[in-house]
Image (cartoon, rainbow, N blue to C red):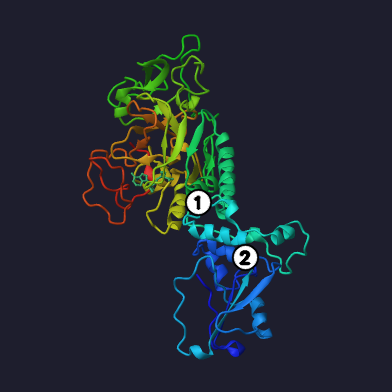
Amino acid sequence: MAGRFPLGSGGNQNRVFIDLTDETELGDTDVPKKLVQGQLPFVTALAYRSPTVPLKRKSLDRSEDISDSSLSDVHNPRRARLSHAHPDPYTPSPPPNRKHSQISVVIPSPTSKQKRDIAIAQSVSNVNGMHIDIFPTTDEEERVNKAAYPTSRARVNRRSIPLSFNSDSVLNLVSLTETNHLSKLRHTLDEKLKRINGPTVTPTVNSPKRLAKLADNFEFVNSYQYRAGVELIPDDSDFNIGCACTSTNGCDRFECDCLSKEEDSEDRIVPYQICENNTKLIVATESFLKRKAIIYECNSRCGCSGKRCWNHVVQKGRAVRLEIFDTGSRGFGLRSPDLIRRGQFIDLYLGEVITKAEADERENLTDGSHTQSYLFSLDWYVKDDEDEEKNMKVIDGRKFGSATRFMNHSCNPNCKIVPVCTTNHADEYLYNLAFFAYKDISPGTELTFDYNQGEENTTPQKIDPEAVQCLCGEIKCRGQLWPNKRKGQGSKP
Ligand SMILES: C[S@@+](CC[C@H](N)C(=O)[O-])C[C@H]1O[C@@H](n2cnc3c(N)ncnc32)[C@H](O)[C@@H]1O
């Protein structure tokens, strides 16, 4: 390394000064800049020492006193420097007119101990984890440290000098501040996660950038967040009905009025059963998971009591622990450290409840680019009719939501989203989006669902070149996330 002062300017014509001393202010020469940018090995910094150390002057070309103007170069912010500890491999050849050239070197006088230390420093090729002992120290420096001498005039705040090395080092101040920042982000995130009802939701995210995304830009919520323009039918509306079952007997599993009827008969659709492998667990039946139906759970208007009624599953809340993790190419993903049984309720998809118009506006703000989308339309009862669509509500999980907001798509998913009405049966345009396990899911397996539920076995005729490419990795992968020109998922299975 070496800083070179350009020759041929003013009184310093054809004279090069190489300063091995001093600790001038940051950024005033080439050398500190290189240091800051980490282009120089650390041993180079050994040359920058306190000007309080006595100096010895040497002229290499011929014995000559250094003129006052030359001496003043010691405090010239653009003066040259060279480290004797690490000669510059790029030092150019001497200029053609050598006769008038002179090179003066201003060096501190190294003690024999320093010489030994410098020799050791030169032999250190890997600076990471370098031990403090290899810094040359002198009695003078020690006295300065003890304030026996006045400190240097130009006070340098060493803490503000961002020394950086090519990899992590015990001496790396930048990584220390980063660590500090990271622990703050983790704390923010932990506080947010603590507010979630039910078993723990933990993040396993190491990348600072991704951690910041999670901690800063997202709020976990435990219920829908209603936004302007969304009209709700009150719970006590006459249209809100309950079943005639009694709390003494509990709900009749086949006769309960809350259950939907088959299309072509008076038979009720039975959504739940006791789990074969765990009698304490009520799960969605296998046949129900294969069909396209909505679940009406019993509510406050029902004659049965919540405690004895088997038709209270989703409204009891999440019973499995969840983990948000980094999938790499697909962003965050979701998994559980628990075994999840087929048909088991996992969690709700939550977010802001907005009108269709608002959802369109929000989607337009993304410039139509197929970036990440968190919009979910409650279009179960909505026919393809403009008036009907006006009533439609959309759940936006971008800024507010539950952990299921991190569930990725798979063309061969292990979860299914089911519309479930838990409280108000009267409002056709408002219900829950509940995730159920399609199959037994072993702990640690990524939880996925089909973003185009209902189109599971289809192959797109033409893959939209602008669509988000599907990276699920399944053999029968359909290649893209959204059907052409449609990004907000609907809940119509
Ligand atoms: C509801 S979010 C899922 C969570 C998301 N990975 C995150 O980091 O926030 C949907 C977005 O995740 C990404 N994604 C989900 N499944 C994917 C897949 N199979 N292939 C590629 N990207 C996927 C897409 O960017 C999509 O818009």
The structure residue drawn at horizontal position 23% and vertical position 40%, both measured from the top left corner, is 475
Residue 294 is drawn in which quadrant?
A: top left
**Within-10-Å neighbours for mark 1: few <14, some 14–19, many 20+:** some
Residue 368, position as x, y percentages in the image: 39, 57
Residue 337 is drawn in which quadrant?
A: top left
Looking at the image, how many numbered discs can be counted on the residues?
2
Q: Horizontal placement of 453 versus 20: left or right? A: left
Vertical side of 262 occupied by 304: above or below: above
Q: Which residue ends up furthest to the top in the rendered image?
A: 248
Residue 2, position as x, y percentages in the image: 52, 72
Residue 394, position as x, y percentages in the image: 45, 44
* Residue designated by label 1: 168
Q: Horizontal placement of 58 versus 480: left or right? A: right
Of labels 2 and 1, earlier in sequence is 2
Query: Dots 2 and 1: beta carbons under 8 Å?
Result: no
Residue 318, position as x, y percentages in the image: 48, 28
Per the model, the C-alpha gap separating discs 2 and 1 is: 31 Å
The structure residue drawn at horizontal position 49% and vertical position 14%, both measured from the top left corner, is 308
Mark 2 residue element: loop
- Quadrant into which the C terminus falls: top left
- From the viewer's side, name the closer residue of 57 and 329: 57
The disc at residue 156 is none
Q: Is mark 1 within 8 Å of ligand 1?
A: no
Does residue 7 show up? yes
Mark 1 residue element: loop
* Residue designated by label 2: 110
- From the viewer's side, name the closer residue of 291 and 27: 27
The structure residue drawn at horizontal position 54% and vertical position 88%, both measured from the top left corner, is 8
Q: Nearer the viewer, mark 2 or mark 1?
A: 2
The structure residue drawn at horizontal position 54% and vertical position 30%, both measured from the top left corner, is 197
Q: Amino acid at mark 1?
A: Asp
